[in-house]
Structure formats: structure tokens, C-alpha cells
Amino acid sequence: VYISSRKADACRKAAEELSALGSCTAIPADVGTEAGCRALAEAVAEREPELHILVNNAGANWGAPLEEYPDSAWDKVLAVNVKGVFHLTRACLPMLRAAARPGDPARVINIGSIDGIKAPVLETYAYSSSKAAVHHLTRVLAQRLAREGITVNAVAPGPFESKMMAATLERFRDAIVKSCPLGRIGEPEDMAGVAIYLASRAGAYLTGAVIPVDGGISTTHGP
């Protein structure tokens, strides 16, 4: 397993923790640039001839009132959330193609958001738009890469405990829990289960799907 982050210290620390469960190597990189995506792919290719599973999990957010929403927010968020998915997937294609087997395709798992399915409550214009773009890019790439034995799917999480959600949960936890049909915030096992399904033989015949993991928020609250 290889993990990457712009912050080298945080990346190394996470790799050390995960290494208690198996081999995990940190490769710091900035996937908000095409050059960073290429550098990351090259670093992995130096170590591995094949890449069986690529998880595009990097994300950026920006909240501000409509009248004050800056152009720089769009540049930052789209560079990481959309362009990063495209550039890194493309850069990793030689390794993904090498890993593909009949009946056992290589996998690309993109992390979207239910904010890309429904309009968000908070004013995160670039973020929600970027996640809708990720969902559609997932379908476009799935169509293109299916013939090469590579599946591309997306997971659209709802509210989970995370650094990005920390401030929102601190202010609105009770309201969010109340709005969730299953009545709770998501836990790591909820995301892990879907990721394992998509990465395993069980998910080998699925591509182009966007799976909401949100306790029913986006699937039971109307069209």
C-alpha cells in the first residue's frame, strides 16, 4: 500500500500507523498539479510494475457567502478535486493496465460526496460542483477504460468524522444526525466496507457506479 499527501510529516505518520497492519509506504506529493500527479505515479512505478487499486481521495473545500466567493476558491478546489482525479488516473494507466486480468480488473475508486448529488446546506459552491464533476468523470472514465479491464467507480460519503467535517459537526452535529434517516454520523467501517467491496472480486462486474454512503440522506429525501 502506498499513501500520499502534500504534508510529508502527516503522510509518514499515517504510513507508520498503517504499517502495523501491513506494508505501507508514504510518498508525499501534490496532486493539485499535473506535475505532482506525474511525480507520484513515477515514484510508485519505480517500486511496482502493477497497480491493482487506485483510490483518488485527495480533497479541498472552501466555504464563503455567495457575494464574497473568490475566484481563487474555484481554482484551488477544482485543481485538487477534479483535475487531480483525471491527471493521477491517467498517469497511473500503464500500471493499472498491467494489473488487469480477465474477470479481475484493475480498480479506480474515486471519492465523491453527497454534496455532488444534492444541493448542500452550506455555501460551498466550488466543492459541491467539483464533486458532481467527479461523479460524471467517473462514468466517462468507466466507459473509456472498461475495454482495457479497468473499472472506475465512485463513493459519495455523507457526514463522517473527518478533519474536513470537524467544524461543521461541531456546530451542526445534532441537526445533521436528525436529518439522517439512520440517525447517526458515519463511521470508518461504513466507508471501509464499500471500498473493500469495490476493490474485491465481489465488485469486479461493477463500473461507472456512484454509491452514496450517507445513512439515507440523499436517497430518501425526495428526488
Image: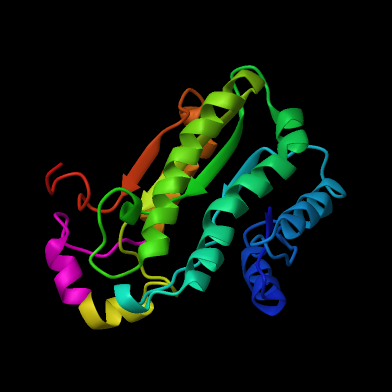
Most extreme residue toward the right is 46
- In terms of depth relative to the viewer, which is nearer, 183 or 131? 131
Which residue is depicted at the point 58% across and 25% down?
144
Which residue is depicted at the point 45% across and 27% down?
206
Residue 105 lies in quadrant: top right
**Residue 28 in the image, given as x and y percentages of width and height:** 73, 67
In the visual, does 185 lie left or right of 18? left
Residue 45 to residue 76: above or below:
above
**Residue 188 in the image, given as x and y percentages of width and height:** 41, 60
- In terms of depth relative to the viewer, which is nearer, 30 or 47? 30
- Quarter of the image containing the C terminus? top left
Task: Tell me if I can see residue 65 in this picture.
Answer: no
Residue 3 to residue 118: above or below:
below
**Residue 196 in the image, given as x and y percentages of width and height:** 49, 43
Which residue is depicted at the point 15% across and 72% down?
175
Q: Which residues are magenta?
A: 173-187
Residue 44 to residue 103: above or below:
below
* Residue 195 covered by magenta stretch: no
In the visual, does 89 lie left or right of 98? left
In the visual, does 46 lie left or right of 131? right
- In terms of depth relative to the viewer, which is nearer, 54 or 117? 117
